[in-house]
Every structure is written in C-alpha cells, then in structure tokens.
Amino acid sequence: MSQIAVHDLYKSYASVEVLRGIELQVAAGSVLALLGPSGCGKTTLLRLIAGFEHVERGRIAFGEQVVASAARFVPPERRSIGYVPQEGTLFPHLTVEGNIRYGLPRRGDHRQRVQEVLSLTGLQGLGARYPHELSGGQQQRVALARALAPGPSLVLLDEPFNALDLDLRRSICEEVVGVLRATGTTAILVTHDPGEAFAVSDQLAVMQAGQIMQCARPEAVYWQPADAAVARLTGSAIFVQGRCHAQTVDCPLGRLPLHDAAVVPDGSATVMLRPEQLRWNTAGQGVAARVVQRSFRGDHTMVGLSVGGLRLGLRMSSLHAPVQGDHGHVAVDGACMAYAGVQAAQAQCVAEVAE
Ligand SMILES: Nc1ncnc2c1ncn2[C@@H]1O[C@H](COP(=O)(O)OP(=O)(O)OP(=O)(O)O)[C@@H](O)[C@H]1O
C-alpha cells in the first residue's frame, strides 16, 4: 500500500493555479524525487503534504487516513513529518544539540535520542558547536538530524543542499538518503538537479507548470521520457524528425528501433535520443559523418559533426576525439523514443546536444 497518496490536487494563489490535478503515490520506505524547473510548484506541493498550506481541491492521504482535502485538515504537528527546508534554517544562538532538541517535545530527557541522531547523521562530537562553527554540509546534516529526532514516518526535503557546490551536494545528498534508507523512512526530495534525482530515488516525478508530467523509475524516465519537455528536463537530448513505421523510425541517423514505451502512430514524428547513444566510428557502422568542428574542453572534447544534413555536437573522450575534417560514421546504440508529429518546441531545432 502507498504510504502517501495524492489525488487530483489543486492549489491557487490569488486565482493563479499553481498545482493542477496532481496525482502521486509514494510507497512506504521509498524515496521519491520531485524534479522540475523553478516555479513549477514543487515547494507548494511539499507544503500541502506537510500541512503548512490548505488544499483547495483533491486530497492527500497517509495510508488509510485522509489528512487534507477541501473538507478535512489534519494540522502539521499531527502528521508525523520531518521537514528539511532550504539552507539557513538552524537557530544560530543554539548549539547543534539545542537545535536537535528543538524538534522534540519539551518534557523528558532526550539526551539518548539526541546522541542517536548525532551518530546516525555522522555528527558525533559536534553537539556543543554552534552553526557558524560548522561547514555547510555539516549544517545540513544537523537540519536532517533535527527532522529525524522525533522519528517521523515521512521526511520532506526541499532542495536542502542548494548552497553546497555540486560535488559536495551530490555526496551529502547520497549520505543523507542513506540515513533515511537505514531508518526505513519514507522521503520526498525536491531537487532541480537530474543527477541528484537519478542517484537517490526509487521513483522520479517530473513536474512542470503545476503538473506531474511523468512519475516512474529513474531509468524509465531517462530513457523513455513521456514527452520532449521531460526529456529536456532530465538531461541532454537530441531531437530529429523522422517517420515511424511498425516500431521503427526512419530518420537522418538511419532506421532505428523504438522503445516499447514509444506509443506513436505510423507517420511523422519527433525522435529523441540521448547523446551517449551516438557512437562515432571508422568501421563503417551507421551513417556517414564528417567532423566540422572540434573544441577541446579538458576532460572531454566537443566534436561538431555533419551527418545526414544535420549538425550534431558530440561529447567525446579527449584521448579519442577525431580531428576537424575527419570522415567516419555515426551509429546509434539502443532504441529511441518518438513523439507523434513535429513538436512545436522542436520545430526550429533539428538537432541539438546540450552539454
Ligand atoms: N504564498 C504564495 N503567494 C503567492 N504566490 C506563491 C506563494 N507561494 C508560491 N507562489 C507562487 O507559486 C508558484 C510555485 O512556487 P513554488 O515555490 O511551489 O515553486 P518551486 O517549483 O518550488 O520553485 P523553486 O524551485 O524556485 O523553489 C510560483 O509562481 C510562486 O511565485
């Protein structure tokens, strides 16, 4: 049974619809990542689940219990939720222990519980420090420890690692999710970093303009995005025009097989490939190509190819990248996605590879 079930959820601010018919299921003990561009409604959805905002239409249930609907509202303190907000929310005048104790009931001796969550979050020995005496990553771990201290059944993390640089952010995020998994806590992580979302989630929900565009396993979202917008939001993508026939597509890169998930009628279609599916070779595999541009970037080289009337940019190992003027072939590995017709957003971009 899903621990969290969100059904047909709507929310407006000053008559502007911010959430529009959200459907979401989160299994008990699993981690769901909520990925989407700024302003698409991610925080609003978390705040409704936490009970910081009222639902306008639809409902949110925890197990069998409806906690929010137009007619019902269970206050946040009775939802057993830990909330880890964006950075900068520790009390600066309280020590680490003081911050953690803040999330626990006033009465009782919580020393043992505080030590438990300190050790769970790798903060042993730092309990007497003040927030300004900690690194950014340690501060975020304190925020997690504070959220975990009361033993919540659900933890909501709202882009808690934003202030950290990319490498640290990803490693702290993996550590934090490791702690959540070790305690069997269900979690929803808001992020706008696809890499972070892929690395830590069981299910990935992609949001845009107040709607969930797709919710599935990370690999499924990456390789079989529901539409071109989801493909772009989840990584680099190449779009070319083609014609579909019997689960194959003819396009400037050859006749390619389609994923089973590509439910598209025969006829004109927009084809989506991930750049790593393209393989430059001099063994004659695939379609003929010529190197028209080369840009050395240190750990990789961007190679501009002219292939079948298209210009494609490929990221290649600097050790093996061909040089300008070289002739070779481009083969496509694996199946691709296709979407019916020429999608407006793709009309003027015949092919592109974002870095
Ligand atoms: N209290 C509010 N009053 C009015 N408008 C709001 C309020 N809270 C959010 N909004 C608007 O709702 C939309 C969604 O905001 P939200 O914070 O949920 O987006 P988000 O996806 O979390 O963005 P970000 O990634 O930038 O944090 C935005 O257009 C925002 O301006």
Image: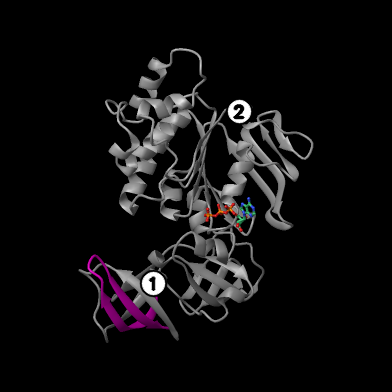
Q: How far separated are the C-alphas under marks 1 and 2?
A: 57 Å
Report the image quarter containing ligand 1.
bottom right
User: Residue sitting at 61 percent across and 72 percent down?
Assistant: 245
Q: Element under label 2? A: helix
Q: Is residue 101 above or below residue 135?
A: above
Label whose residue precedes the other's in the sequence (1 or 2): 2
Give the number of the mark in front: 1 or 2: 2
Residue 120 is at least partly visible in this image: no
Measured as percent of width and height from the top left, residue 209 is found at 63, 59
Residue 117 is at least partly visible in this image: yes
Residue behind mark 2: 77
Q: How is the image coloured?
A: one colour
Q: Amino acid at mark 1?
A: Ala
Q: Is residue 302 magenta?
A: yes
Measured as percent of width and height from the top left, residue 28 is found at 56, 31
Range of magenta residues: 286-307
Query: Dominant secondary structure of the magenta stretch?
Result: strand
Q: Is residue 308 above or below residue 39?
A: below
In the picture, residue 315 is in which quadrant?
bottom left
Q: Amino acid at mark 2?
A: Glu
Neighbour tally class for label 1: few under 14, some 14-19, many 20 plus, Cα within 10 Å:
many
Q: Image check: 206 left or right of 191?
A: right
